[in-house]
Amino acid sequence: MSKMKRIGIDTEALKEHFGKKIMELEEEKRKVKHKNENKESKYCLQKYQDVHGQKLKALEAQILDLKKKQENQVQLLKQKEKSEETAKKLQDEIQYIKAQKVQLQHKMKQEAEQFRQWKASREKELLQLKKFAWRELQIATDNFSERNVLGQGGFWKVYKGVLPDGTNIAVKRNCPTMVKRSTSSLANSGSKSLSAIYR
């Protein structure tokens, strides 16, 4: 704001300076004309007219030159004012982007912490899941009866079951055809590929 005020003062000062010069030249021009009009001698009058005519032309050229300089100075000041406004806008945009960056970094840290806490919570829940014996699941699903099938995918079937305490569960198990084809080693070792979840 102080720069804007200073530019406005400079412009007014230039206008006042050039205005005074123009007024002085106009006054001198008027005096020369007045002197020309008061000469009695035709010879002197002609001589003075020639001399002062040249002076008038020179003064008019100076006035024109001063006016051009004044216009140029005003244009330069306007350009300077515009450049300063543009620079200020750019600076404001930079500060805004920096603030956005800080906010984004803070948000990313918060989300990373939330994810870490969620992951730790999930891992804790998984550790607390109850592990079932194969025989328990056979009993709960009536030996994986087809009437207890809830649904199936490409390689899995999901069975409903009930534990001795009345808790309903769902058990996901390899399809029998897949067990025969690719899990003979697991069957021979007594291992079963399945999972159980509470409902």
Image (cartoon, helix red, strand yellow):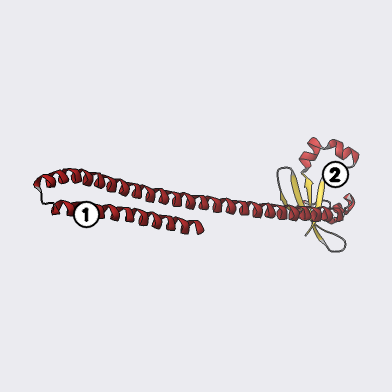
Q: Where residue 195 sits in the image (x, y, percent)?
A: 81, 50
Q: Where residue 137 sits in the image (x, y, percent)?
A: 85, 53
**Above or below — where is 83 with respect to 177?**
below
The part of the image, by quadrant, that contains residue 174 is: top right
Identify the secondary structure beneath mark 2: loop
**Above or below — where is 182 with respect to 53?**
above
Identify the secondary structure beneath mark 1: helix
**Above or below — where is 59 with respect to 110?**
above
Characterize the local packing of mark 1: few (<14), some (14-19) or many (20 or more) Cα atoms within 10 angstroms: few
The part of the image, by quadrant, that contains residue 188 is: top right
Query: Is any part of residue 141 visible from this angle?
Result: no
Cα separation, mark 2 vs mark 1, equals 122 Å
Residue drawn at point x = 75 percent, y = 51 percent? 158
Residue 31 numbered mark, or none: 1
As drawn, the residue found furthest toward the left would be 42
Query: Is any part of residue 105 visible from this angle?
Result: yes
Q: In this view, does 15 lie to the left or right of 30?
A: right
Characterize the local packing of mark 2: few (<14), some (14-19) or many (20 or more) Cα atoms within 10 angstroms: some
Which mark's residue is nearer the viewer, 2 or 1? Answer: 1
Could you tell me the amino acid type at mark 1? Answer: Lys
- Tell me the residue that label 2 is attached to: 192
Q: Nearer the viewer, residue 158 or 199?
A: 199
As drawn, the residue found furthest toward the bottom would be 166
Q: Earlier in the sequence, mark 2 or mark 1?
A: 1
Q: Where residue 172 sits in the image (x, y, percent)?
A: 78, 49
Quadrant where the C terminus is found in the figure: bottom right
Residue drawn at point x = 90 percent, y = 42 percent? 190
